[in-house]
Amino acid sequence: MKNSIEARQARAGRLFVAPALTLIAVFFFVPVIGGLVLSVTDFDIYAIGSPDTARFVGLRNYADLLANPVFWKAVWNTFYFVFVGGPLSVLVSLVAALAIHSRLTRLPSIWRTVYFLPVVTTLVAVAVIWRYLYHPRYGLLNYGLGAFGIPPIDWLGDPHWAMPAVILLAVWRTFGLNMLIFLAGLQSIPEELYEAAHLDGANDWGRFVHITLPGLAPVTLFVAITTMLGFFQLFAEPYVMTQGGPLKATTTIVLLMYEQGFRWWRMGMAAAIAFVLFLIMLAGTLIQLRVTRERAR
Amino acid sequence: MKRALALAGWNALLLAGALLTLIPLLWMVSASLMPTGEANTFPPRLLPSVATWEHYQTLFTHLSVLRNFRNSAIVAVSATLLSILINALAGYAFAKLRFGGRDRVFGFLLTALIIPAQVGMLPLFLLLKTMGLVNTLVGAIVPFLASVFGIFLVRQYALGIPDELLDAARVDGAGEWRIFRTVVLPLLAPILVTFATFTFLSAWNDFLWPLIVLSDDAKYTLPVALASLSGEHVQDTELMMAGSVVTVLPVILVFLALQRYYIRGVMMGSVKG
């Protein structure tokens, strides 16, 4: 009797996971392996009609990439976005979370909702909106800056300003998510710690440095890694606002992959770009985990 | 007195931050109602001189945005409904049903979380092409059906279901499918609403994949249609803002209605994960 219940349970278990596992295998793991295979072929527009014409070319796509200055430009732009925009977004999130968590704050749940709202908006739509906010003459941003005596900036037309403009939009759209995670972290720090520090005569800054920051360490690692991984995949903002320009100043790795793969149908090359992106993201994650572990020691 | 001042000043600061956050969205709504040309004036206008619906009319008549709206709704709603069923079954089984290799398979699934979707996108496109699913809405839905994140979310929640409850139903002679339907599903309801909200928003907002898999205006989802329109109608600021309102408003409303569940999902994914 007992055995038959266990056997039935095991059968049901396998049946219940079967649809999800099949879908994930067919539509995720097989394509990922396929991507690796594709990246060592010269699969192009002719091969889409008759796949037999694609040939094995070894690491030639990777060699071509490393010799291509546009690829290095895209890597540089993506790193600029990740390592300037990412920390900026996390910093704004932390400030917003601390502000909402403060004892002086009335109606924290309303502020929380408002600050979070940009996170759920459609990226393409907000990129369209911000393109007009950035208009050198009619845009609200230059108008606002003008009130402080700052001369108009050609945000999306000047190669030096295009990436900062993309970063500003990304910070606006993403900070609410990490703010929420920091808020959860702040709420999990026991109140007694603060009271004890108060009795020991610690001032506000001392309590922030010795209780709040260490208390936030675990969520900070999570936030740092997920933000970095998300920022590495920058695509829609430059696609909509600048088409990668001006002078390729906002061409990112994913944008380059999209253009190679789906505009020029050089799918072998595009697969190599995607795989390089994966390796970069993996390395970034491992480094962050390593650094955190070393620091904990 | 000093405390009251500090309180007022502090909350005024929060209000200023909130206004700054909302300005792009408020301006979008305002500009979408301006008569043609009024959004391109100096100094910039904050409010329309007279409110007009003409840009919304243009969108839905000349530009047939209604069918793009319908495409987005079909993709987001079917992706949500199907993925709830598929991932609830799997998440529950990984948490509560004992079968050989269960934990190893689950551990392996989690590795998928660090692989960016772009790595598989090109072969997925070729695969769907051989299946005849390129330029169909089914093709746009496929990547959302099974989600490692969804399975993870449901599993964490389902771990809290007491085994005694399930065993009691088993002793009563209920089959596993019936237990899932009548005992487990109601208990999972809160986390399923959370996951449904996530899936709906990400399917509605998704851009890169529908841009790749859909090639025909009539099949475009709203974000793809909006990106394509914004190329042709760069000068028509007011029209583009109306298009942005139509695209963004549904997700904002869904979020505001279900934010309690959505926010819990974010917290679960981070603090416990």
Image: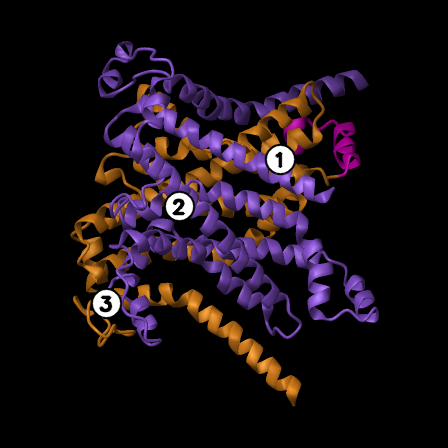
Q: Can residue A290 be seen in this view?
A: yes
Quickly name the residue at label 1.
B181
Which quarter shows the N terminus of chain A?
top right
Mark 2, secondary structure of its residue:
helix
Q: Quadrant of residue B23?
A: bottom left
Quickly name the residue at label 3.
A138
Q: Residues within 10 Å of mark 2 (few under 14, many from 20)?
A: many
Q: Nearer the viewer, mark 2 or mark 1?
A: 2
* Same subunit, tags 3 and 2: no
Q: Can residue B157 be seen in this view?
A: no
Type of amino acid at the residue the image marks with label 1:
Arg
Query: Where does the magenta region start and end?
Result: B162-182
Residue at image position (54%, 57%) is A91
- Badge 1 sits on which subunit? B
Quickly name the residue at label 2.
B204
Q: In this view, does A260 lie to the left or right of B94?
A: left
Mark 3, secondary structure of its residue:
loop
The picture's colour for chain B is orange
Q: Is residue B91 above or below residue A31?
A: below
Q: How crowded is mark 1: few (under 14 residues within 10 Å), some or many (20 or more)?
A: few
